[in-house]
Image (cartoon, rainbow, N blue to C red):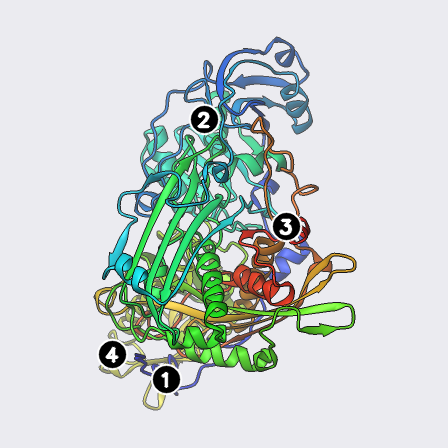
Amino acid sequence: MTTETQKPQRVDGTLTSIGQKKPRIDGTLKLTGGADYAADRNLPNQTWGYPVSSTIAKGRLVALELDEALAMPGVLDIFHHDNFDKLSRSPNDFAAANKVGESRLPFEDNEIYYHGQYIALVVADTFEHARAAARKVRAQYEKSDDQLTDILALDSGQGDLPGEDVPGDASSRGDADSAFESASIQLDQRYSIAHENHSVMEMHASVAQWENDMLTVYESSQGVVFQRNALAKIFGIPQEKVTVISHFIGSGFGSKLFMWPHAVMTSVAARRLGRPVKTVVPRELEYLNTGYRPTSLQRVRLGADDSGKLLSIHHDGCNETSPAGLHDDTVSGATPSMYDCDNVAVTNRLVTVNKGAPTSMRAPGEASGAFALETALDELAVKLEMDPLELRKKNFAEKDPAADLPWSSNHLKECWDNAAQRFGWNKRNPTPGAMKDGDEIIGYGMATQSWEAMRQHCSARFGFRDDGTLLVACGTQDIGTGTYTIVAQTASEMTGVPIEMIDVRLGDSSLPSGPLSGGSFATATVLPAVSAAMKEALAELKTLATAEGGVFENVDQDSITLRDGRLVSGDNSIEIAELLRQNRIGLVDGEASTKPGDEQDQYSFRSFGAVFVEVRWDPGISRLRVARVCSTIDIGRAINPLTATNQVEGSIVMGMGMGLFEQIEYDAHGYPYNNSLADYVVPVNADMPQIEVELLDYPDYLRNEFGARGVGEVGLTGVAAAISNAVYNATGKRIRDMPISIEKLLAS
């Protein structure tokens, strides 16, 4: 079911900015070095922090030998369990709602939970002095040898998955057990995803400064308002006494959604020393202390009749968590909504391992879950001797079967057909190894893509200035996805003021409260608040213009419209800037808050897509490569198709990482021996295939007045499965454990 109503934003019914490919308004700043990132910030009288980390994975810190380090040049102090402020833990309402537990405070006790855990922070007058002194700190431990870093080692390979059930994660409809047992076609397989790291370009950094009892933190953060709230609770001070600033971010992928211990350590050190402190987390410690996509193990059981109609779906998930911070990835969470099936049961379990706390990583849960479900569907199609695309079409869900609600908008069928046609799916030979080009064997694979289309509460400020420019402000942030640009496009669309005359302010917690930049909900959340704030400011302008002696004196305010930076009523009009100058007013602004409404209970909101992949396998030299990727995505209206397409392209590259490259590896002692960009393998330029992305344009006005849903996550889901399915088509070997390495192909 699809419900759409055209609601053009312009008076004349045209769209001149929204929906257009616009270059990023912050591009020049980034290219010329004018964009201020957290680690670029240097304050007067600043000092430097450098962490000292544990060299064991489990045990207890018995003592620290600090004399040699304290005697090093420039050292001001060393902070640790016995030299640290007593703080309060910070419950996070958003985190709790998303099954993320509170993390332990730095130096909270002397227990060691994972290799790389912070045990001290050296602060010195320069970065070099701090780093040199940190290397002189010596630690004594009581070591435990029963650490666990691999949940796959606990799996028997049969029956239930290891771990503890998570209350609230299990759901069911119908009788999946009976339906599975009676199905003529059955599939029961296990799948796993390796531990993946975010590998962001900009490393995590905090610069903390106290002025009397006011704390300012310059942070690389995907949630300045949430970090402000957390710091206020930790230090026991009012929120208005904390400011977190993150104007520009060199990507985060989820690793910068929530605050990590280095920010608290740095803030304590700055308060104790009475001087600003900057801490930049070294890359090797980033891989251990700023989250990761947790290893997951999944079991999928599918039952179908001979025609391919799904009769039963079981999807059981298990992911690792940490004693340093609970994280539930809920890999099976989306499965009940994906396909039309009367009998569905999903569960999720957790296993505590001796690693740092996992966290959200692009398309958390669903990216991992989609790999298992979409690979299982491919295997079912093989059993049925049926085209994998036709199997999915046969089980298309006309409404959300989990919520029993109509879709706000669903064009998955068109995504399937569009991507299949562009890819040339009709040329696929289902016989493994049958398609060849010289020495290379060609494989085709496909998968469905999906991500929940969410929206949150948001506030924004909108101002008209007497020089003709606009001011738009919101306490959200741009993590490199183009938020600055789409906010400017929206303001331009509503007012007719050119984009180059719009001043967008983001990344400051003192601005009106905005959302996290994660979950693909920033666009759908922020733009309605910007619109509402503009209308508040416009109402003030109308009042000013219709006042006694005003240009529209005695004119009904409802007859006044805003067009191209002018107030217009009949044949009369005035530039807003001129109106302000006439009244000697420099700025008229409005502030407003918006949130989802009753539509949440009336419709199900989800974005869909289809991804098709061609791989090539040269058995003579054991070379596997992705040659082509073709994806069609339905995200409602793309506010900026240029940046939106770029988001999907980046997602596809991350999907290649999951499918072929990325895996943190631990030795028997819990030591991660590839925790650096030199050793942690990610896709690089030489691995890039031909990538073709097409965005459908069906505005979803039930989600918001702009018809926009998020795009950051949906493009990643299904990519690893499509790669795995293509590898099977090329080689006849089914690799169910990501990533697909050459060793696995040769051994299988």
Q: Earlier in the sequence, mark 3 or mark 2?
A: 2
The amino acid type, in three-letter code, at marker 1 is: Val
Q: Label 4 belongs to which residue?
A: 557
Count neighbours of disc 2 (C-alpha within 10 A) and say few if under 14, some if 14 to 19, many if 20 or more.
Answer: many
Residue 431 lies in quadrant: bottom right
Closer to the camera, 743 or 644? 743
Q: Earlier in the sequence, mark 2 or mark 1?
A: 1
Q: Label 3 belongs to which residue?
A: 744
Count neighbours of disc 1 (C-alpha within 10 A) and say few if under 14, some if 14 to 19, many if 20 or more.
Answer: few
Closer to the camera, 557 or 430? 430
Q: Earlier in the sequence, mark 3 or mark 1?
A: 1
The residue sitting at 49% across, 66% down in the picture is 378
Q: Secondary structure at mark 2?
A: loop
The residue sitting at 56% across, 29% down in the picture is 670
Disc nearest the viewer among 3 and 2: 3
Residue 13 lies in quadrant: bottom left
Q: Picture coordinates of residue 599 (x, y %)?
A: 24, 68
Q: How many marks?
A: 4
Q: Earlier in the sequence, mark 4 or mark 1?
A: 1
Q: Picture coordinates of residue 424 (x, y %)?
A: 60, 80
Q: CA distance from mark 2 to mark 1?
A: 55 Å
Disc nearest the viewer among 4 and 1: 1
Q: Secondary structure at mark 3?
A: helix
Residue 106: mark? 2
The residue sitting at 45% across, 59% down in the picture is 370
Q: Label 1 belongs to which residue?
A: 11
